Structures are given as C-alpha cells and as structure tokens.
Amino acid sequence: MKQTIRDLQPAGRTIFLRVDFNVPITQGTVTDDSRVVAALPTIGELSRAGARVLCASHLGRPQGSRRPDLSMEPVAAVLGHLLGHRVLFIPECHGPQVAKGVATMGDGEVALLENLRFAPGEEKNDPDFARQLAAPASIYVNDAFGTAHRAHASTAAITRFLSPAVAGLLLEREVTSLSRLLGPVDRPYIVVLGGAKISGKIDLMESLMERVDAILVGGAMSHTLLRARGIEIGRSRVEEDRVDMARHILERARTRGVDLVLPVDHLVAPAVDSDTVEATSGVAIPAGLMAGDVGPRTVDLFSRRIQEAATILWNGPMGIFENPRFASGTRCIGAAIAASPGFSVVGGGDSAAAVRQFHLGDGFSHISTGGGASLEYLAGRSLPGLAALAEKDT
Ligand code: ADP
Ligand code: MG
C-alpha cells in the first residue's frame, strides 16, 4: 500500500470515499454499526483536514434497482451520531442531485450517497457509470476492504477517472495486518478453521498448507473431513459432494507435513433446537444425532495447540454459536486465541461477529472487517480493489 490518505493535501477538495457500510438493517434500524465505526478514523481525518467527504457504499443485493428497504438513509443517521455532527444524505449516488448536494457542502462536511447497487453500472464495473461517480470529486479514497475482492465501478473502474487514488486507514491496516500472515512469521503458525462449509474455503486451505504448521478444524466443515476419514457423523451437516475434495485435502496435508487436527468429540442433539445436548464419548457421532459444536476434549486439545502457537489465524466458528446450546466451543476457542501473546488475526464475517458477541476483541492483534475479501487475500489472490490502487502508484 504505497499511497494512503496521509499523502494527501485534502483541504477544500471533494473526496469520493468508498466505504463498506453494508450493515445489517432490520425495519429501518441498523442493528450492528461496527462497519461504520471501522471507517470513522478515515472519515474523521479527512473531515478534520478540511476535505468535503462524499461517502459511498453498497447495501445488500438490490441488483441494479431501487429498493426502499435497502436505502442508505438510516446509515447516514448512524454515521452522524457517531461523528457528532450532521451528515448530509443524498438520495442518489450519481447525477445532478449529487452535484447539487455537493454544492451546499462546506469544508470538513460529510455526506453519504444512496446505495451504489441501486445503479446497474456498479456491479458491472461500467466505466461510464464510474465516470459519473467520479464527476463531483477530485480525489478517490478506498477504505472498503470488505469489497476489495470485487471489481465494481466504485472499487475498480473509478480509479481511471480520479487522481490521486489512495487507501484509507482501515484498508491500510487490513493489508498491513493480513500481509504479515503471508510473509515470514513467528512459529508455530497455527490456523483454526471452522464454519459452515468446506467448499468456500478449499483455496484458502490449499494455500495455507504451504505456510502453516498445523490446521485445527472444527464446525460443520470438520464433518466433511471426518466423513472422508470414514467416520460416522450421524445427521450432522455435511457436504456430500465435497467428500472427495476433503480426501484430497487430508492427503495433501500428509504429504506437506502439515498437522491437520480434527475434533475428537462433539456436542450432539437430536435436532438443532433440542434441549437434550450431550457430549459424545468419541469421535463418532451416533446415528440420529447431529453435532452442533465441538466437545470438551476437543476444546482442550485445540487450546493446548493454541497456547504453543506464536502466530494464529482464525476463520470460522467451531459450532452453531448463534444458538446458546452450541456456543461454548466457539467461545472457549476464541478465548484461548485471545489469551495468546502471539500475533492473532480473525477473519470472516461470522467469526468476527462471534469475537464481538463474546467480548474477546481486545485479545486479538487484528479483527478483519472483510469476510470474503480477507479469505481471498489470505489465499494469495490479487484483489481488484487493491490492484486498482496499485496501478495508480506506478
Ligand atoms: P465466517 O463467516 O466466519 O467465514 P462461515 O460463514 O464459514 O464463517 O460459517 C459460519 C456458520 O457456520 C455459522 O452460522 C454457524 O452456525 C455455522 N456452523 C458452524 N458449525 C456448525 C455445525 N456444526 N452445524 C451447522 N452449522 C454450523
Ligand atoms: Mg459467514
């Protein structure tokens, strides 16, 4: 990340600031403002420096047409509240209304544009649309790490029309922290993986195998690996069509000398909402039962490995942590990572939510705000949003 907002002289300039305000909204109320909070340092810094800050984001998947329930307007109110001053909401993301709104802004003022994905050009990375987005501004800042893996008009094409085009403080921090995991790290380097599916994380696993000492796997994705080892998994969530892939991963870990550690017991129940939850005596899951969490012996086993680690990456909950019956594995493993004095990073939307839910944030070196983006970055892929900035640097 060569150029950041620290290299700007933004006083009196209008800045197009791409943020990730893709927040959960229920009946007009923002239920989790952490993505807005994460963008405050950049917005505050630009505003204090006297820039006119035009924030823009997508929200949900309106697929190119206007959806009142996906308006950014409630987010403008939240942002204004957090900043402690007025934020102008402009109910369009391009065109004359934006120009009119910008004309009313003074130095240091902040505005929020309407949902970028109301316009079909956004996800198409349409250069004409990107030119219209760029029109009211003279500087481009990208602070939307969560969208950096998408080549969209506001993350990629727009950099052709604005110079300078630089990174915000959040984007910079994400890249600095995550890139540490791609270079030489202190060892042992241990990865804790979990979550719903193995399918979205195959590339990540393949890439991590080249770098890490051990991979501890919990969550539903461990069921597919257990099945590949021929172990009974009862009615637990599994991806039948990925069992071959799982077998390949087990084989690969063996040849690479990477320790792939699977659960040795589970918390099981007849159904996800059943109150008769019990721990299995071994690795097999009895017929008719489903695993909703890792068991206590697995927590001990994983915690010991985590205590020895100097570098830890965590992605994916150990169980259905949203359900209190199955939260303990994720909470205990999260706490073990948080207690580690080593360099610890959590990536993935649900894992980061778990860290917040269990108040473990202070124990982590970095909590990535990018779900898919952090996984793609850690799999060694080039992210279009970062590439678009890098092209401007050279
Ligand atoms: P992240 O967003 O951190 O990358 P994922 O999206 O891959 O994580 O997975 C999170 C989801 O996995 C959670 O909703 C959780 O309930 C689910 N999950 C974890 N373990 C299990 C399990 N044993 N059975 C069913 N679902 C599970
Ligand atoms: Mg998720």
Image: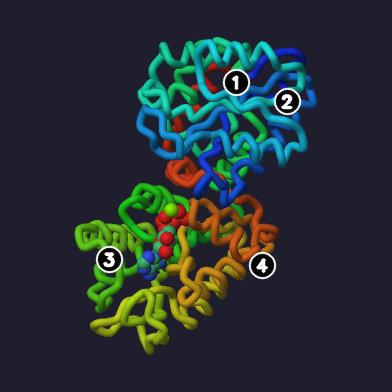
In front of the other: label 3 or label 4? 3
Indicate the secondary structure of the residue bearing disc 3: loop
Q: Crowding near pointer 1: few (<14 within 10 Å), some, many (20+)?
A: many
Residue that lies at the very extreme toward the bottom in this rendered image: 281
Separation of disc 1 and disc 4 at Cα? 40 Å
Indicate the secondary structure of the residue bearing disc 1: strand
Which residue is under mark 2? 46
* Residue type beneath disc 3: Val
- Marked residue nearer the N-terminal end (1 or 4): 1
Please state the horizontal and vertical placement of residue 209, each as a whole percent of the image: 41, 54
Separation of disc 2 and disc 1 at Cα? 11 Å
- Marked residue nearer the N-terminal end (3 or 4): 3
Q: Is residue 261 above or below residue 234?
A: above
- Marked residue nearer the N-terminal end (2 or 4): 2
Which residue is under mark 1? 16
Q: Is residue 113 shown to the viewer in this render?
A: yes
Q: Are marks 3 and 2 in contact (CB under 8 Å)?
A: no
Separation of disc 3 and disc 2 at Cα? 48 Å
